[in-house]
Image (cartoon, grey):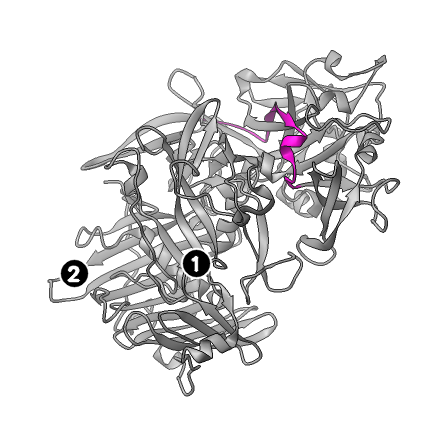
Amino acid sequence: MTRRLPCATRATAIAAALSAAFSAAWAAPASNSAYRSDAQQSHVEDATSRGISQVNMITCVMGAMRPDALVNEGNYVALVDSNKCDPETRASSSNAGTDSASTSAPAYMTATVNSTRTSNDEPMRARTWIDEKQEDFSATIFVNISASEAPSDSNPYGVFRLDYCGKGSEGPCMMNGYLDGSAEGISYFEIEGGEHGSTKALRLTHNGADSGAGRLSYQQDEGTVNYRFAYNADYFRRSDGASDQCFSRDASDGDTQMSVWRYGLYDATTGDRVERQSGFPIEFTAGNGERYRGHMGYWGLWLPADAPAPAHGATVQRVEYQAGSDPVKTDYTLAKAEGRLMRYTKRTRTLAQIDKLPFQTWVWQMDGFFEGAQPNRQYEMHWNNAAGEFRVTGEVVCDNGPCQSRTYEVEKSVPASYFGAIGGMRGWSQSLGGELYIPIAAGGAPVDAAHLNVVYRQQDLVYPADMPASLHCLRECPTAETIAAYFSEGSQAESPFVATTYNRWGPADATVDYSTSAADALLKDSAGHAVTSADRQAFAAQPRYQHGLRSGRLFSSLDDARCTGDSTRFCEEKIEQIDTYYQWETGPNQWNQFAALKDGQGGFVNFDAPLQVNYTVPAGAAYGNYAGKTLVLQYGGFGELWGIPGECVSRLTNEKVSCDTPDTRYVPAFVIPFDETLGRVSVDGTNYLVKWLDREIRFARKETSVCQTAGLTLPDGLELPTASDLRNPSDPASPIYIGTKPEVTAAPRVIHGEVKY
């Protein structure tokens, strides 16, 4: 296998990122199919990657604009999905469950690009203006690129210079940096001001394609980090002054770990890509006469932060791109509501079939749970079929900052009778695509795991015509009045739900009833008021609901919820086993609200929900407890396959650790192999093939003496770049001044790397 420096990427004539690149051609159903020809890329993740994350994101953004493909074709607009270039967003999206709206929807940045080359003897120059707009912040990133030599065996980075400055409408650069590639190596420097100002500097030298050395310095919350490193064809050595680490560069080493962030799905017979109609680009003209671009899809309406939201009934245009001619634009009518109804359809498999598949559950009752457990906590567990009991592997800790999983050194045993005493096990499992329910009966009788059905759910959006005429609720039931009371300033209300339904699990004497309105896609309470609120400030004042408000389970037939043995009362555990139930959500975010388009005949454009597929994990130690198990994954469109369970690894050693350990990363627990047999998923009897597209490699850790014996010496005296070589492409006095941003009224020519026309 080809080996590369762990902090260098395959450079292009535009720029170079600091990681490794691999590609391979494999057999596929057809020799010319997409399954065979779609490119695969790999990069190496190392502790030094944190210091150069900005470089990697910038080069990802620049590559997605395709200035190399539109040289001397004038000014054009490119849309770049920042979610696909931001490693933090990419990670959360890749490992999200079915409620992944916030990370699955695209988040486009708009860039204006001008790429020129006067002759074959002159460098290519790309001038770019990137609009970065948020709700309370607006800036432009000015970028100038000059590239004069392509990468080669003797100079793996080529010859190029990338300078950038991010600034508001006035004042100095808030962010100013450069990336310089030459025959001597790579230099990178960035200074960022503001409250969390920082400086980053990298110097990388090379001796051919397979050996070299470097220094890296950057600031983080704990202070300044300084690394020295060296590499040859076989090993990589890194030191921060306190810890000297050695790694094998052989990607085939048995201890080398890998994670995949993007997969493609293909027809198992033809090898064609499996496409989903998950959304398309739109344009609309606001009341101020400005033209804005957005995206309409299954997760709703996405707009730039500075765009005024079009009203219900507004006209928007779908933009369809075609080669060789201008885009075709078609009028649609926007339908909006400040809430949406989700449907959950029952799926089952036996308890034995989820052996060792992890789930999380909230535990408040300690009687019968393991000794030393604390009440009112979320625990991580699985069913151990061989032992005939549940095992607790850790807990979710939310004491300081973001919640983290704390893994126990020794698993704790919990008998099935514990859940039988509280009406069954209710939890959430990424491995099964979302929430699940295990209906364990009370009484302490042994569990027949081979025949006890575990209930899990497939989620999809309900369009107005499919909304049930009436719905009922037992637990966590909101009304317009209770929502308004809870979110009002100075409120003392305990919750936004009807008081008698808040956190209630026991039998109920009555239900909270709703009607629905297909005309305006709303849920209405018994007073006829819409059960909605989109007050962003009010939600922000209640952090518990900052991501929106969701009801408990809603059901359409009262008979479905009548308690066994007492038909005058209603029981939550009965709802958990019906074929279909619903939940209503509302809030200020686009994924809390319904948004759809109507065509000229008044019919809704129905977008495809993520395709829920089953994947049987291969056998082998590399797959851990998941080996041989069948998982539920979601496919939202090309490159968007998520649901693989995750684990945490140390940034410093690449080894698996508890997620509450300092300096950790969350990564997928295994890789679906690019193999026609082992990389196969299915849904309702139809088979598809999976191919990884974007892979991360974490090299195997070795004893430091191994690197020393191999002759790897950490560099001394290697000077880091400084601010003295900064240039400002936004400054009219600078020789690389790119000018003011040109006005382009034509539709975008590039959407995240794909040239449309």
Which picture quadrant has residue 381? top right
Figure quadrant of residue 126: bottom left
Q: Quadrant of the C terminus?
A: top left
Amino acid type for the residue under numbered disc 1: Ala
Q: Residue at x 56, y 68 (%)?
A: 196
Instruction: Give x and y (percent) for residue 661.
Output: 65, 62
Q: Quadrant of residue 204?
A: bottom left
Residue 167 visible at all:
no
Using the image as rendered, state which of residue 710 and residue 193 is in the foreground: 710
Residue 3, placed above or below residue 443: below
Magenta span of residues: 334-358
Q: Indicate left or right for 32 with 451 as reference.
A: left
> In the image shown, does 241 or 596 lie closer to the viewer?
241
Distance from disc 2 to disc 1, alpha carbons, whole Å, reads: 28 Å
Residue 139: which disc? 1
Q: In the picture, which quadrant includes the N terminus?
A: bottom left
- Is the magenta region chiefly helix, strand or loop? strand
Asked if residue 534 shows in the view, the reply is: yes
Q: Position of residue 507 (x, y in %)?
A: 84, 23
Amino acid type of the residue tagged 2 in the rendering: Arg
Residue 117: image tag: 2
Mark 1: few/some/many CA within 10 Å (<14, 14-19, 20+): some
Confirm whether the magenta stretch covers residue 349: yes
Q: Nearer the viewer, mark 2 or mark 1?
A: 2
Magenta stretch contains residue 299: no
